[in-house]
Amino acid sequence: MQTDSTSLKLPIENPEAEDFLPLNGTDHVEFYVGNAKQAAHFYKTAFGFQDYAYAGLETGVKDRTSYVLKQDKIILVLTSPLTPDSPINDHIVQHGDGVKNVAIWVDDATKSWETTTARGAESAFEPYVLEDAHGKVTLSGIKTYGDTVHVFVERSGYTGTFLPGFVPLETGFNPAPTGLKFIDHMVGNVGWNEMNTWVDYYKRVMGFAQLVSFDDKDISTEYTALMSKVMTNGNGRIKYPINEPAEGRKKSQIEEYIDFYKGAGVQHLALATDDIIFTVSELRARGVQFLEVPKTYYEDVLDRVGKIDEDLTPLSNLGILIDRDDEGYLLQLFTKPLMDRPTVFFEIIQRKGAKSFGKGNFKALFESIEREQERRGTL
């Protein structure tokens, strides 16, 4: 169930990384949420995800319910507790709705667990096998920042819908897809002076290498700042930027996230499209709210980024940001937080050759975030 970027472009390979596991791509991302049925309706209606699989009381699961949604190579699992003593409840009380498990597709989940724990990872759970008439899947898990877990998924011998224990989900309600293709990258927010700790973790434990870094001179405004380092595995299919706060005159978006999420966690998923004008037009029509940048951004943006294939008018009308690196350019836009707590959001991104992360847009983006923080009274 590969969810890498090979369907559109070659991934960004990093020869400095070690692929000793190896990692084949993102398998799925599991959110713990207060009401999975209602959350599934939201992600289907607003973002165009489709019914895929289900587990709950009807399938013999007594302590939780999970709705699995799919759009192209992106698989989201939305899980809610069914009992008050469930540890899922504890996660939701602490963090609100948020990402619990970032699952990675591997050839050998047992070897992946043995190798990473031997290299210093703390085990979340030991390898175990799920099996049904369609075959078997091996799962194992290691802990990463905050309460987040990396789940290793070995599914080469499985032909079922998602995992053993799940049944195909058919509700009869499937709004059309919006052109989202795969997870381009996934960003984690960590606390003060913790970024290098987790950068070292991904190097030492998982064989990642640093692709790029940004300091508080790169990512800052008059009021706030942060620092970030982008970690990637060798084949480039998995990219994890790690953010930490930096000193500023006011509270940064990372501090706001840490305050409301009550610790480190996944800040956003960057979802790739090959037609961002179509995708963002669809999302806006469905009520998705995006951060707004002033129209003055577009007055000189082409002077900075040069010639692009798209007409600037629809990009300006939709609020889509543009940036360029030595390899090409990219188009991107960020939703407002998806939850009432100002925590997790989505980024929509289209790469036209660029391998970077929109450094030229940081100032405009952060000023937009600060305007939202000011409205919330948290700046």
Image (spheres, grey):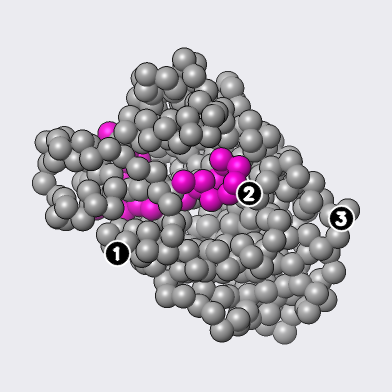
Q: Is residue 265 left or right of residue 50?
A: right
Q: Which mark is residue 278?
A: 1
Q: Where in the figure is residue 25, as x and y percent of width and height?
A: 50, 57
SS for callout 2: strand
Q: Which mark is residue 84?
A: 3
Question: From the viewer's perspective, is the residue at label 2 or at label 3 nearer?
Answer: 3
Residue that label 2 marks: 98
* Region in magenta: 336-360
Question: Compared with residue 266, is residue 227 higher up or lower down, i.e. above or below?
Answer: above
Q: Is residue 320 magenta?
A: no
Name which quarter of the figure residue 212 lies in: top left
Q: Where in the figure is residue 248, as x and y percent of width and height?
A: 47, 17
Q: Where in the figure is residue 65, as x and y percent of width and height?
A: 74, 67
Outermost residue toward the right? 85
Amino acid at circle 1: Phe
Nearer to us in this view, 232 or 374: 374
Nearer to us in this view, 124 or 32: 32
